[in-house]
Image: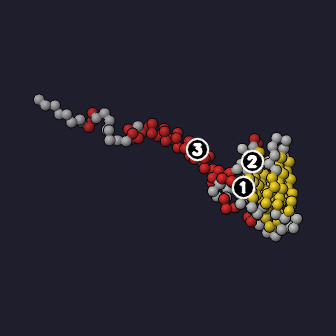
Amino acid sequence: MTKDRTPRPDSSPINAHQSWVLRHPNTSIFIALFMLPIVALTLFFTLRPYLSTFDRSGEGDLNSSMSSPNGEYTAELYGVPYGGAAGGVTIWVDVRKTADTSASNAKSIYRAEFHGGNHLEWESDNTLRIENWSEYSNETVTLNIDEEIYDGWGWACSSLRTKDQYVRCLAPES
């Protein structure tokens, strides 16, 4: 009497040709639900500086404005709150042609955390000094409004989307 050595379909332990995912569906679902958010958050925080824009999108309250010595430009200082009660304020400085009242034509040249002491001062027709300081931090800078921007987080300096908007980008020293 010869034994039939072909396995019967109902007694086969594991089909070796099935992928690991099909053999372990519960573990695969758990790994996917756990790993996908981690990968997505890692990509978001890794790529965010490279894809950020240097635009406040019309948010914030106008704190002060000042015309250039020749009257051609107007610098506007905005405060944009973030984070609710435990948050803070980001300061933006926009420059626009005085004759152009449209806010969409303003060029953002400065972004930093609010430190307490703020002041705008034109040093020449196209050079603006922006003071933003406290006893613990100082992000005061003088910018040529046609060529330079300042980003307190440094994202605009590494962003691929803002490279054509300035000649020189300044950021705080790390």
Q: Eyeballing the image, is 142 above or below 83?
A: below
Which picture quadrant has residue 150?
bottom right
- Looking at the rendered structure, the kind of residue marked 3 is Thr
In the image, farthest residue toward the top: 1
Query: Tag 3's secondary structure?
Result: helix
Q: Which residue is mark 1?
A: 169
For marks 3 and 1, give the CA distance: 26 Å
- Looking at the rendered structure, the kind of residue marked 1 is Cys
Residue 66 position, x and y percent, is 86, 61
For marks 2 and 1, give the CA distance: 10 Å
Query: Tag 1's secondary structure?
Result: strand
Tell me, yes or no, whether the two marked residues, 3 and 1, touch with CB atoms within 8 Å. Answer: no
Label 2 neighbour load within 10 Å: few <14, some 14-19, many 20+: few
Residue 164 vs residue 33: left or right? right
Label 3 neighbour load within 10 Å: few <14, some 14-19, many 20+: few
Residue 164 position, x and y percent, is 67, 62
Residue located at (63% from left, 50% from top): 48
